[in-house]
Amino acid sequence: MHDKDCIFCKIAAGELPSAKVYEDDQVLAFMDIGQVTKGHTLIIPKTHTKNIYETPPEVAQEVFARVPKVANAIKEAFQPAGMNILSNTEAAAGQTVFHLHVHLIPRYGKDDGFH
Ligand code: 5GP
Ligand code: ZN
């Protein structure tokens, strides 16, 4: 499913550019434009789903199954001390793009800019 007004659907379809970290038939991982910390990456399903509440289990499985591979690629490239992995769900929790995405936020210490 493709939502014509969704920015992440456009990124997944290659209609908008992104700095890709990993891609296969089901998911895309790309650099977050905001770079909360160095290497901040998002993983999205190519199919449109608003957030985890509305995500079929098989789509969630596709996304979350790729987390270890992408996390290790970021770890290797950026050598962070740790990583926060999260999915903001609904506006009240900070969700601003309503296409499911998992943030991988490399951590370099408590003063690295992420709170
Ligand atoms: P949310 O606040 O919904 O959890 O996260 C949305 C994220 O998408 C933000 O961290 C924001 O920087 C990122 N973002 C928004 N628009 C774009 C874009 O066009 N390209 C990329 N690479 N990231 C985007
Ligand atoms: Zn979408």
Image (cartoon, rainbow, N blue to C red):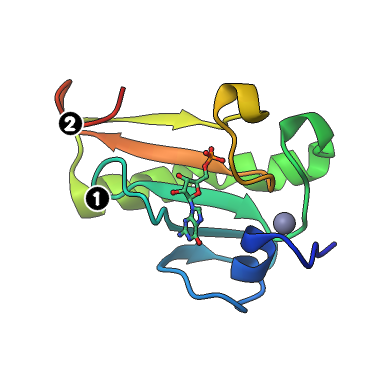
In the rendering, which numbered label is found on residue 24?
A: none
**Residue 9, above or below 35:** below
Q: In terms of depth relative to the viewer, which is nearer, 95 or 60?
A: 95
The answer to whether residue 100 is left or right of residue 48 is: left
- At which x and y percent is residue 16? 56, 75
The residue type indicated by label 1 comes to Glu
- At which x and y percent is residue 72? 35, 45
In the rendering, which numbered label is found on residue 76?
A: 1
- At which x and y percent is residue 110? 17, 20
Tell me the quarter of the image containing the C terminus: top left
**SS at circle 1:** helix
Q: In terms of depth relative to the viewer, which is nearer, 78 or 65?
A: 78
Q: Quadrant of residue 105?
A: top left
Q: Quadrant of residue 109?
A: top left
Which residue is at 77% across, 46% downward? 59
The residue carrying mark 2 has its beta carbon less than 8 Å from ligand 1: no
The residue carrying mark 1 has its beta carbon less than 8 Å from ligand 1: no
Label 2: how many Cα within 10 Å (few below 14, some 14–19, many 20+): few
The answer to whether residue 99 is left or right of residue 59 is: left
- Decide: marks 2, 1 in contact (CB < 8 A)? no
- At which x and y percent is residue 3? 80, 62
Tell me the quarter of the image containing the N terminus: bottom right
Q: In terms of depth relative to the viewer, which is nearer, 73 or 13?
A: 13
**Residue 20, above or below 29:** below
Mark 2–mark 1 Cα distance, whole angstroms, equals 18 Å
Question: Which residue has dot 2 on it?
Answer: 112
The residue type indicated by label 2 comes to Asp
Which residue is at 58% across, 41% downward? 96
The answer to whether residue 40 is left or right of residue 79 is: right
**Residue 81, above or below 18:** above
